[in-house]
Image (cartoon, rainbow, N blue to C red):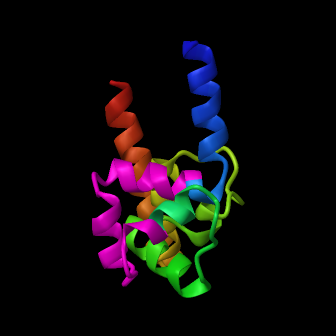
Amino acid sequence: MRKMKKQNQNNMESTLGGRIRMLREQARLKQEELAEKLFLANKAEVSRYENGQRIPTIQQLSRLSELFDVPISFLLGEDEGLDPLEAQALSLFRKFRTEEARQAVISMWKNALIIAEK
């Protein structure tokens, strides 16, 4: 039973609606609260997204991406194998536009890894 529940959860997280639900729950938002942030009429619209009955517009996908700080590609399942924290790190990294800034971030991550391994 537990294995089936885990499998269903993994299948759910592989869909756009499942990822929206997962991110909403991780952010500890109720459907009503997410509806407000997306300027939707009510929680039923969020429920329809999460259950795959309706697809968000590109504007709403953009807002979800900003709200949860993940790339739109993660919402759409194009970043296979990434968990939400990895997607968030990737999204933040992509905001650094210059090579110098990106190299500084990589250097900080390498230093953090050295400290973590001690």
**Magenta highlight on residue 30:** yes
Percent x, y of residue 18: 57, 51
Question: Which quadrant is home to the N terminus?
Answer: top right
Percent x, y of residue 35: 36, 73
Left or right: residue 37 versus residue 51 is: left
Name the residue nearer the viewer: 111 or 5. 5
Residue at the spot x=64%, y=64% of the render? 53
Q: Tell me which segment is drawn in magenta.
A: 18-45
Left or right: residue 4 versus residue 38 is: right
Q: Is residue 45 above or below residue 14?
A: below
Q: How many marks?
A: 0
Percent x, y of residue 20: 50, 59
Name the residue nearer the viewer: 3 or 98. 3
The answer to which quarter of the image holds residue 6 is top right
Residue 98 visible to an observer of this rendering:
no
Residue at the spot x=64%, y=67% of the render? 73
Judged by its main secondary structure, the magenta piece is: helix
Residue at the spot x=29%, y=57% of the render? 29
Toward the top, the furthest residue is 1
The answer to which quarter of the image holds residue 16 is bottom right
Q: Is residue 16 above or below residue 35?
A: above
Question: Which quadrant is home to the C terminus?
Answer: top left
**Magenta highlight on residue 35:** yes
Residue at the spot x=39%, y=56% of the render? 24
